[in-house]
Amino acid sequence: MTFAASDAASGAPAGSFAAARLPFAGQNGVHVALKILIAGGFGVGKTTLVGAISEVRPLRTEEQLTDVGTGVDDLDGVERKTTTTVAMDFGRITFPDGITLYLFGTPGQERFWFMWRDMVFGAIGAVVLADTRRLASSFSSIDFFEEHNTPFIVAVNCFDGAKRHTTRQIRTALDLDPRVPIVLCDARRRDSAKHVLTTLVQHALDTDTR
Amino acid sequence: MESPKERRIGSDAGPLVRPYALTGGRTRPQGKRLDLVTILVATGAVSDEWARMSRDQRRLLELCRTPHTVADLTSQLDLPLGVVQVLLADLYRQGLLEEHAETPLTARPDPRLLQRVLDDLRSL
């Protein structure tokens, strides 16, 4: 199968039919659900970011044959079948007041936009996770959220060894609206991931009341 | 229909049944638009279709005894989202599932809800 290495593939019973328990749903189920989208290129740290603050599960989506199957550039050699499974990172944070926050991470490239279009409706907003070594890979995500009037922030994952830039340099390089927040983060750290999410939600609130 | 004991012979082998065979070849859900965070719950209505339902549909109904989101259901069934959306839309049309009324999805969440999420995140 093509979906990215995930806890569920190894940890949870394969073919979860056998599991009668509902490990994921809490005892009383979900009552208020909200979602945040995490966009970014391959290897930029989406899975890490989602995993730093929530429980991650894989979510399979099937690429549409006609839309995406042809003329697609090589994707690490894994997606050569006629139908391919795309894994979305999917994380959940359940709060005591009954709100469940869902984080969905999907690739930012334009050819995945058919997925984004469905997902963006009703979302709090989006985090565009960027890597300063490959800033250009963030352009298409930024374009998408600008076009859809979705509140978004840019979070720059500064993992070890990555060249540091100031947020001002990054803003210039991305040609970003001055109102769009940029945060430097370490996607591995929970407090950092928390800062990223709070910045986004605050920005979404500010956007609504502006 | 009784299914084989194991749907997969190994994680590398992929599914033994093409995913959309489970939906009778349909790739688009009919009727209700089901978002990843749409919350569904079983209505408790009795269906005379039960005997003809697939194992996956029965399992969806069982899970929905408590409110579940489409994303949770998809992850639990380990089937592609598109397949689960078709199966769920069928159950919805038959009146076996309904949307959990507390959270109708709007284009943008209510600011009061956003404020709650912000407070929740800060107290993590």
Image (spheres, coloured by chain):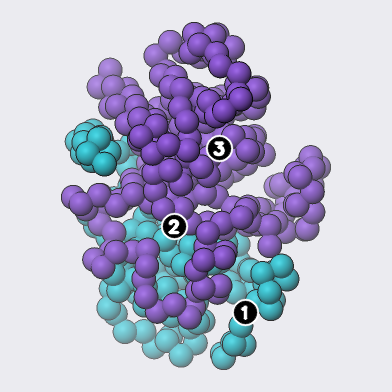
Q: Secondary structure at mark 1?
A: loop
Label 3 neighbour load within 10 Å: few <14, some 14-19, many 20+: many
Residue under numbered circle 2: B71
Apparent side of residue A72 relative to residue B28 in the rendered image (left or right) = right
Q: What color does chain B have in the rendering?
A: cyan
Q: Secondary structure at mark 2?
A: helix
| Amino acid at pointer 1 | Arg
Do pointers 1 and 3 mark residues of a single chain? no
Give the CA separation, mark 1 to mark 3: 32 Å
Image quarter where the N terminus of chain A lies is bottom right
Between marks 1 and 2 in the image, the one whose residue lies nearer the viewer: 1
* Residue visible at 60% across and 40% down in the picture: A107
Q: Is residue A163 above or below residue B89?
A: above
Give the CA separation, mark 1 to mark 2: 21 Å
* Residue visible at 51% across and 42% down in the picture: A48
Residue under numbered circle 1: B7
| Amino acid at pointer 2 | Ala
* Residue visible at 44% across and 57% down in the picture: B71
Label 1 neighbour load within 10 Å: few <14, some 14-19, many 20+: some
For disc 1, the chain is: B
Question: Residue B19: x percent and y percent?
Answer: 64, 69
